[in-house]
Image: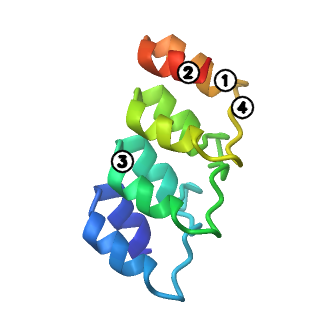
Amino acid sequence: TPLLYAAKKGHEAIVKLLLARDDIDVNSKSASNWTPLLYAAGEGHEAVVKLLLTRDDINVNSKDYSGLTALLCAAQEGREAVVKLLLARDDIDVNSKDINYRTPLLCAAQKGHEAVVKLLL
């Protein structure tokens, strides 16, 4: 969908325009089950993540086929600012696990992302 591609590429202005439409599904999924939030979080597009999180209907814990969530992806990639944004949500599952039973904390620790580990503790 246009929103998926705009979020993946970090096109903040386009994401903002698309989110203003009533017919845009903020939880749309790619062929691999990735959502706009998952793409933006993984790429570290903080401004796009902020925009997506303004939508009441966003599912912040949506998983791809391997169980990856936006928080897991951001933690794994060391996206500290994005992790902070996601942790500010009351509905975020900080202990979500992928199909290999890895949590966001484990992923951040394995990759040596100390600042992210501190946020998750």
Give residue 97's mark: 4
Q: Residue at x 34, y 54 (%)?
A: 47
Looking at the image, residue 84 lies above or below residue 14: above
**Disc 3: which residue:** 46
Instruction: Classify 10 Å Cα crowding around label 4: few (below 14), some (14-19), many (20 and above).
Output: some
Dot placed on the residue nearer the N-terminal end, 4 or 1 = 4
Question: What residue is disc 1 on?
Answer: 102
Residue at horizontal 35 percent and vertical 42 percent from the top: 44
- Left or right: 103, with 72 as reference point: right
- The image shows residue 29, relative to residue 108, as above or below, that is below
Q: Are the two marked residues, 4 and 1, in contact with CB atoms closer than 8 angstroms?
A: yes
Labels 1 and 2 touching (C-beta < 8 A): yes
Q: Which residue is mark 2?
A: 107
x, y (%) of residue 8? 36, 56
Which residue is depicted at the point 27% across and 63% down? 11
The x and y percentages for residue 32 are 55, 55
Q: Earlier in the sequence, mark 1 or mark 2?
A: 1
Whole-Å distance between the Cαs marked 1 and 2?
A: 6 Å
Q: Secondary structure at mark 4?
A: loop
Give the Cα separation between the discs numbered 3 and 4: 23 Å
* Amino acid under disc 3: Glu
